[in-house]
Amino acid sequence: MKYQKLNNGVEIPMLGLGVFRMEDEKVAYNSVRKAIDLGYRHIDTAKVYENEEPVGRAIRESGISREELFVTTKLWNEDIANDNAAKAFETSLKKLGLDYVDLYLVHWPIKDKYVSIWKEMEKIAQSGKARAVGVSNYQENHLQKIVDLRSLMPAVNQIELHPYLSQQPLVEFCTQHNIHVESWSPLCANKNNLLQEQSLNEIGEKYSKTAAQVVLRWNIERGLIVIPKSSNPIRQAENLDVFDFELTVEDMQLIDALNKDLRVGPHPDEVGF
Ligand SMILES: NC(=O)c1ccc[n+]([C@@H]2O[C@H](COP(=O)([O-])OP(=O)(O)OC[C@H]3O[C@@H](n4cnc5c(N)ncnc54)[C@H](OP(=O)(O)O)[C@@H]3O)[C@@H](O)[C@H]2O)c1
């Protein structure tokens, strides 16, 4: 596993397990337990995934000390709209059964709330119950409003990012402001035949790796934190096994060239929350 240091010094494992679409309690619990057994140390959940309780239980019962695990959860849109961050955060902690999270994110940019919600996040950071705070799905224009506050900078911006949506300008903006980027749906949610792409498979053959492993490695080599979801132990192990090979500059360029600004999720500026 590789780690990165966030802008407040907190270390984050560069690859974590995403647990979206694991509403089934048993699936969520077993997936997190198995992933931790395999060596995952970073789990990405959210209030809206409706699995904080089994995810937290799996973390507590994993046998791995809390300090070794990096846990993220997120503030959902209705709580942003209703200025309910403090209460929602406490509810998430309670459901997880944890004293603190490592990262708490504003899930989506909600119109007219960018600044007020960030001030609430600053208070949560000051409480010490979130080791780092950040945002998700923020575009440059949303981030700029936080930059202009000249106060606490988000540690992370978690955005949709895969070879069909490489997000280079937004990644550069974040890098300039020392905000780490996390890639969600890094495998394009296994849609649009990304993993059938010929170039990804040809690159994989050179290193005896799958297309999914090539895509995850491309993230790591761009310095991005990546959170693939799998509830299948074989694919969980496959996704974790990306730290023993390196892509060449030519490989990276071939993967970069797949970009077509194609989203599997909503565009943050068009989302009707
Ligand atoms: N902040 C946000 O707004 C936001 C939005 C979406 C997602 N996320 C986060 O990002 C995480 C990942 O995104 P995602 O779940 O949408 O998509 P993803 O990780 O790109 O893809 C998950 C899909 O790919 C399959 N898969 C996993 N590993 C594979 C492999 N090695 N080979 C082939 N198929 C594989 C999974 O099936 P199996 O489970 O059957 O393996 C699942 O169907 C989420 O779980 C969540 O934590 C955040």
Image: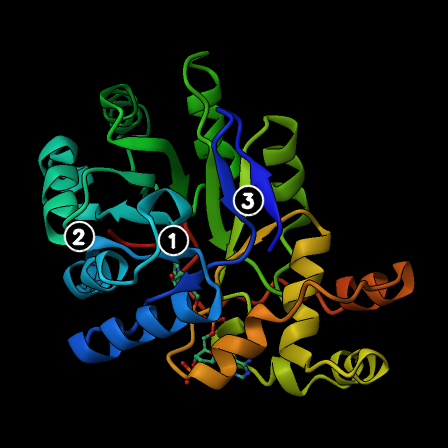
Residue 56 in the image: state x and y as whole percent: 21, 57
Task: Inspect the image, locate mark 1, and give the three-letter code of the amino acid beneath it.
Answer: Glu
Given residues 86 and 76, the one toward you in this image is 86
Residue 252 in the image: state x and y as whole percent: 81, 62
Question: Is 171 on the left or on the right of 269, as rendered?
Answer: right
Task: Inspect the image, locate mark 3, and give the three-letter code of the amino acid beneath it.
Answer: Val
Q: Give the residue at x 76% y 62%.
A: 256
Q: Give the residue at x 41% y 13%.
A: 151
Rounded to the nearest whole Å, what is the CA distance between mark 3 and mark 2? 24 Å
Q: Is residue 16 above or below residue 173?
A: below
Report the residue marked by disc 3.
181
Q: Which residue, as the protein is rendered here, is positioned at the far top?
A: 150
Ligand 1 lies under 8 Å from the Cβ of mark 1: no
Q: Is residue 198 above or below residue 241?
A: below
Q: Is residue 107 visible?
A: no
Report the residue marked by disc 1.
270
Check the picture and name the quadrant holding the N terminus.
bottom right
Camera-side mark, 1 or 2 = 2
Camera-side mark, 3 or 2 = 2
Residue 86 in the image: state x and y as whole percent: 13, 31
Q: Earlier in the sequence, mark 3 or mark 1?
A: 3
Is label 1 in contact with label 2 (beta carbons under 8 Å)?
no
The residue carrying pointer 2 sits among few (fewer than 14), some (14 to 19) or many (20 or more) residues within 10 Å by Cα, namely many
Q: Is residue 65 above or below residue 26?
A: above
Rounded to the nearest whole Å, what is the CA distance between mark 3 and mark 1? 21 Å
Given residues 192 and 189, the one toward you in this image is 189
